[in-house]
Image (spheres, rainbow, N blue to C red):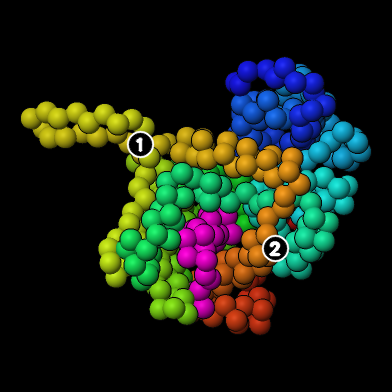
Amino acid sequence: TGARSSMPAEKRLAVAIVGLGRAGHVHLRSLSQLTLKVRLAWVVDINVEVVGRVAEQFECKGTADINDALADPELDAVIICSATFTHFDYTMRSLTAKKAVFSEKPISHDPAELEQVLSLALSSRLVFVAGYQRRCDKNFRELKQQIDSGVIGTPRVIKCTSRDNPEPPIEYLQVSGGIFHDMLCHDFDMLHFLTGKFPEAVYSIGHCYNPAIGDMGDCDTVIVTLKFASGLLASVDTSRVACYGYDQRIEVLGEKGMAQANNTMESTVTVATSQGFLGPRSDFSFPERYKQTYLTEIDEWLDQVREKKPDPAEWTRRHIMLEKVTTASELSWRLGREVRIEDVESLRDKVPPSTLHGPAH
């Protein structure tokens, strides 16, 4: 962990973490390395045993009710990483209480709720960031810089590979939002990050190798193709599991050349024998792959909170189109045809109600 700050506690930002699952512990680790600028004031979770243990470990207050934390006048900001279907409610409560917010995605699976959150965030001028951490990854940032420099010319083809490891537990998948809203939305956001554009139409094909995932109306292996107004073509192939490690790569083809962002590996060691060359595996999973990225993401958000500098409105409102592209890709898989983004609103009823999006509310 980082060195303890010698600054008075009130000089540091006071932050609450809501949700103490895997994502919550990733952010706990980040905050423990940023003690010069932040103090963990509250932890919130419905599991009171976990709350007690973490509150004692981090010497902060704990509760099962987020309202206890939001009532604290010294609290500056909230990190929301609870169950996906709670994000909207907790985000609205936090913004209404005049607290800056960092929320893991999804903000909401309901476009009307999404609009509510974004409108409140923009009108309040509070810092609001949704957790698409790949935008903070040094390799993907370098890839964008190379594209923007013009060294490969105008992008014509972008190929994204996004394969998870290990396969998430069924209990998580049941409320994850499904593979499109849980995984592929990250890739669609990355395409926007690299190009500044959203597609006009998408076409998806998918298959399910795990019957338990199929039984919940989802699939575990998908390829999506995306067509842009400029002529750019993009594809994303995704899988819930890759036995060789976490696999996220991007290749961009332009008329002057090609740029790639490759996987990070467990080590840089290669062993050569008479049997050939043996290299390291990819990082095991997302906490290993994006350890530094998650730290950068929270560090930059804290700077925004301290400086009272919210994202530009167009960055915040991109989530409207991102949700439409993601829903279009799911509709394409379900309908077995190309779906244009402009047709999404008229087709939403074709996505069946599902526990994938959490309990009815």
Residue occupying the point 62% across, 69% down? 321
Q: Is residue 153 above or below residue 66?
A: below
Position of 319 with respect to 200 (left or right) is right
Task: Give the quarter of the figure containing the N terminus.
Answer: top right
Q: Is residue 319 visible?
A: no
Position of 224 with respect to 34 (left or right) is left
Q: Quadrant of residue 177?
A: bottom right
Counting the numbered discs, the total is 2
Separation of marks 1 and 2 at Cα, in angstroms: 37 Å
| Mark 2 surroundings within 10 Å by alpha-carbon count, few (fewer than 14), some (14 through 19), many (20 or more) | few
Position of 76 with respect to 320 (left or right) is right
**Residue 156's mark?**
none
Q: Amino acid at mark 2?
A: Ala
Question: Which is more toward the observer, 171 or 279?
Answer: 279
Q: Is residue 2 visible?
A: yes
Task: Give the quarter of the figure containing the C terminus.
Answer: bottom right
Residue occupying the point 68% across, 51% down? 129
Specify start and end residues of the magenta stretch as a single range.
179-202
Q: Quadrant of residue 277?
A: top left
Q: Amino acid at mark 1?
A: Met
Residue occupying the point 50% across, 73% down? 199
Q: Position of residue 206 (x, y in %)?
A: 44, 65
**Of labels 1 and 2, the one closer to you:** 2
Would you say residue 87 sits in the magenta stretch? no
What residue did someone put label 1 on?
Answer: 265
Q: Position of residue 18 (x, y in %)?
A: 75, 39
Q: Position of residue 23 (x, y in %)?
A: 62, 39
